[in-house]
């Protein structure tokens, strides 16, 4: 089933300066349902690490990168799965900007996206609630 992904990225500074600075990035991709609402927020709460990629896997293989732009420390991105049926159980993997501008992949993390609405990307851990 083809689903639509939507990311809303915003810088804390941009929001404080101008609420209209928010931008929507939309892409098409095949994914399983993330559950009721399917909406969750990624938070880059690191001191100085840049997120360059975010991938999901519902058991049928890894997605393409959801992010159109890098997420600097302090930035958030809202993500939304759209579908009528599917699995709440997802695995996600985050890519960080390496010293040589490469992508450094973190360990995959299992998540019940029906229950989790906030995903925190910290310096030494990734957690959700």
Image (cartoon, rainbow, N blue to C red):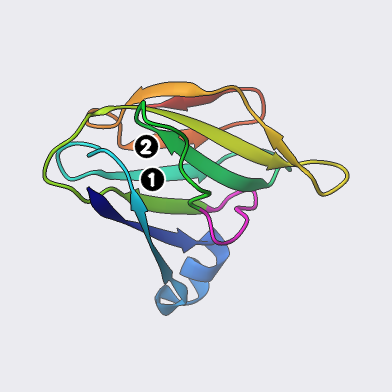
Question: Which residue is more in the foreground, 110 or 30?
Answer: 30
Residue highlighted by disc 2? 118
Q: Circle 2: is it few (<14), some (14-19), or many (20+) Cα within 10 Å?
A: some
Instruction: Label 1, secondary structure: give it.
Output: strand
Which residue is drawn at the image coordinates 53% and 69% (left, top)? Answer: 14
> Residue 41 — which label?
1
Q: Mark 2 touching mark 1, by CB under 8 A?
A: yes
> Residue 112 — which label?
none
What is the tally of numbered marks visible in this picture? 2
Q: Is residue 19 above or below residue 29?
A: below
Residue 23 shows up from this direction:
yes
Residue 124 on image: x %, y %: 65, 23
| Range of residues picked out in magenta | 67-75
What distance separates the C-alpha of mark 2 from that of mark 1? 5 Å
Q: Circle 1: is it few (<14), some (14-19), or many (20+) Cα within 10 Å?
A: some
Side (left or right) of 63 relative to 85? right
Q: Quadrant of residue 99?
A: top right
Which residue is drawn at the image coordinates 49% and 34% (left, top)? Answer: 120
Residue 129 shows up from this direction:
no
**For residue 28: magenta?**
no
Instruction: Label 2, secondary structure: give it.
Output: strand
Which residue is drawn at the image coordinates 22% and 48% (left, top)? Answer: 1
Q: Quadrant of residue 122?
A: top right
**For residue 68: magenta?**
yes
Tell me which numbered mark, 2 or 1, is placed earlier along the sequence: 1
Instruction: Name the quadrant of the C terminus.
Output: top left
Residue 13 on image: x %, y %: 56, 65
């Amino acid at each position: 089933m083809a689903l639509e992904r939507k990311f809303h990225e915003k810088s804390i500074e941009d929001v404080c300066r101008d609420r209209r600075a928010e931008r929507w990035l939309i892409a098409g991709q095949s994914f399983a349902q993330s559950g009721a609402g399917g909406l969750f927020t990624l938070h880059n709460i690191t001191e100085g690490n840049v997120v360059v990629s975010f991938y999901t896997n519902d058991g049928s293989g890894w997605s393409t990168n959801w992010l159109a732009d890098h997420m600097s420390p302090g930035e958030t991105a809202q993500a939304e799965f759209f579908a009528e049926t599917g699995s709440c159980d997802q695995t996600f993997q985050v890519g960080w900007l390496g010293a040589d501008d490469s992508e450094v992949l973190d360990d995959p993390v299992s998540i019940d996206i029906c229950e989790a609405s906030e995903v925190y990307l910290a310096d030494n851990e990734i957690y959700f609630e």
